[in-house]
Each structure stands twice: as C-alpha cells, then as structure tokens.
Amino acid sequence: MSEKDRRIRPRIEDFRPAKEGHIPRSLEELSPEEWARLKEVGIEPEAPREGEFFQADARVVHCRTLPEGLELLPITEALRKYDWIEEYWWKTVDRDKDEYTRATDEDLDDGYFIRVLPGVRLIYPVQTCLYIRTPGVVQKVHNLIIVEEGAELNLITACTTHPGVRSGFHIGVSEFYVKRKGKLTFTMIHNWADETYVRPRTGVRVEEEGTYISTYVTLHPVASVQSMPVCRLVGEGARAVFGSVVVAPRNSYLDLGAVVSLEAPNSRAEIISRSVSTGGESIARGHLIGRAPQIKAHLECQGLMLSDEGAIKAIPQLDAYYAHVDMSHEAAVGKIAQEEIEYLMARGLSEEEATSLIVQGFLSVRIEGLPAELQKRIDQAVALARQGL
C-alpha cells in the first residue's frame, strides 16, 4: 500500500483500542500543557456554558449540565436509560456504510447524547470535547443530538490530541434531529496531530421550518480527514447551511463536503467552502439534490493555492427533479494576485505579512445565522493559523 493509499484508507487494525489508553479520572489530572492545547480549540473553563462534556480516549471524564430543559449524558448511559432512543439510533447513518461505522457499532467507546426539550431556547452554547490522549489508539464514538419542536441549541465540539501524541485514529458517528421550528447551530473545530486519521460519519434530518447550521474548521496538519455529511430537509420551509474553513498543510489529505437533499417545498440549502493548500491536498465536494418544487439551493467552493506541491479539487454537483427549482453553484481555484501583495507591501508590510493577511481574509467566512461568539471563535482560530502560514 502506498503512502497516499494509507492516508486515504487507514486500517483500524493498525491502532490499539482506546480502552487501553492512559485516561484521567477528572479534568484536574490534565497538565498545563494539555490545557494550553485545549484552549487552542476553544475549551475555556471559565466561559459561560449551558453544558459541558469531555471524553478522553474511551472514558467520559466530565459531563455537566445546568439548565432545566437540557439533557446531556454519555451515550452509553442514555441507551440504558431510554428505550425510545432506538427510534433514532442508526437511522440517519447506515451502520453498514463502511468498515468504520461497522467498527463503531460493534465496539463503541461512548460519545454524547444531547436533547433540548420542546420550546427551550438555550442562551449559551453547549461545549463538547473528544480528546485522544494516548498515542496510537482508535477512538470510536457515536453522538445523538435531538432538538425538539421550537427548541434552540448552539453546540461547539472541539476535537484534538494530547500535545505529546502524533498518531491516532478518530471515528465519529453523529446523528442530528431538528424538529419543527427548531434550530441547531453546530460548530466543529479540529486540531489534530500530523499523523492522526479522522473519519466523521454524519446524518441530519430537519423537519418543517427547522434550521441546521454547520461550520467545520481545521487549520493544522493532519494525516487525513474524510467527511461527507448527509442532510435531509423533510419539512416545508426547512433550511440547512454548511460552511467549511480548511487549510491543508504539506502531507495532509482533506476530503470534505456535504450532501443536502431538499425533499419538501420551500426548503433552502447552502454549502460554502473555503480551502487553502500550503502543500497538502484538499478536495471540496458539494452535492445538492432538488426533490421538491419551489426549493432554493446554492453551492460555493473557493480554493487558494500557496504552494506548487499541493492540490485543490472542487467537485460541485446539482441534481434537480422538478421544474420549479432555483439551484446554482460556483467554484474557483487560484493563487494570490501579485498586485494585492504589492498593494499591502507599499503600506509597510513585508511580503510574508501581506500574504498571511490576505489568507486570513480569504478564510474569514461569515455564515448567516452563526452566533457572534462562535464567529469570534472561528476568527480567532483563523488569526492563530495565520501566524503559522
């Protein structure tokens, strides 16, 4: 198997079970170096939160919820507590989708269960963290999130590794359900090690007048990430927005995208992708499927090449099955214009400073409906990555 094939198709058997990891009993056991790493993905102990969840390798180290109307539990505990979860379990993601979903189904390392009760609109975000603390382990999690009718949730998931860990494998199955007039804002920030393999497997179902907004950010070296969430808009007036902000450093392979199936009249969808290659390969996919009349959908993929070693591939796809649809896409890949660099250099910046400032502006995507705190967090992550560019 070639090096690229190994990055694209990592083998689970090459990694140790996460249950064999060096797992802390509480957050107090984490070192200052670990806390510094966690802060890079937005874990702030003093920040206002409605709920907190922290899993290291295969153990849930911390799980806390404050307000009434919010349930936050380890998924293994929720499965024991509620028989009705079977109505949602493995319903938006096929457990036989690939070897990674099958492995998660057969040997689960936990995950989180979140349910916001009808009509409850949470003020502050819920923060979850999936953390690989031991070198060479495979972490298999399954998350279930249910936003009931008229409820609202801002969920921030941070994923990272111990500062001393270079290799690992994270498999994350996530199922999202947004009921009638509910709203879920989901922000995922990744900061993995350079020999970490990541395979999210995500399914989303949005009902009448519900809203799902997803933002994915990865700006640091990683062996490979492959993710293609599938979202079904099944209720009239349902809406989905997917945004991604990614940097592919040298030796990184990122294959990212989203599929949105618009299955009800007046549903809307948008997929926005910004990718930068500094020597790695980035594939930006988007697939919009119009299965109902009077739907509106747009797909936008933009890439910026900063090295001759890497590659960016934009792969948009539109499928329409009704005459009365409004679907569009645009894709562009290029390099920084020399006149832009010269303009900034004429105002006192060095060439490196001018380049990094332009890249920061390119990656600073504004997602409609994203709460101000989450947008600020993304902007901070982009600004931090700019120093390394």
Image (tube, rainbow, N blue to C red):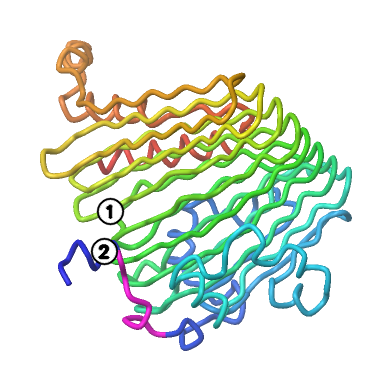
x, y (%) of residue 237? 73, 29
Label 2 sits on what residue type? Arg
At 52% from the left edge and 50% from the top edge, which residue is drawn? Answer: 229
Which picture quadrant has residue 17?
Answer: bottom left
Label 1 sits on what residue type? Tyr
x, y (%) of residue 221? 29, 54
Q: Which residue is mark 1?
A: 253
Q: Is residue 15 magenta?
A: yes
Range drawn in magenta: 9-16
Q: Few, some or many C-alpha atoms within 10 Å of disc 1 (few <14, some 14-19, many ≥20)? A: many
Q: Secondary structure at mark 2?
A: helix
The answer to whether residue 150 is above or below residue 225 is above
x, y (%) of residue 62? 66, 71
Spatial CA distance of label 2 from label 1 is: 7 Å
Q: Secondary structure at mark 1?
A: strand
Q: Which residue is mark 2?
A: 7
Q: Residue furthest left?
A: 308
At 59% from the left edge and 60% from the top edge, which residue is drawn? Answer: 93
Per the rendering, the mark at residue 91 is none
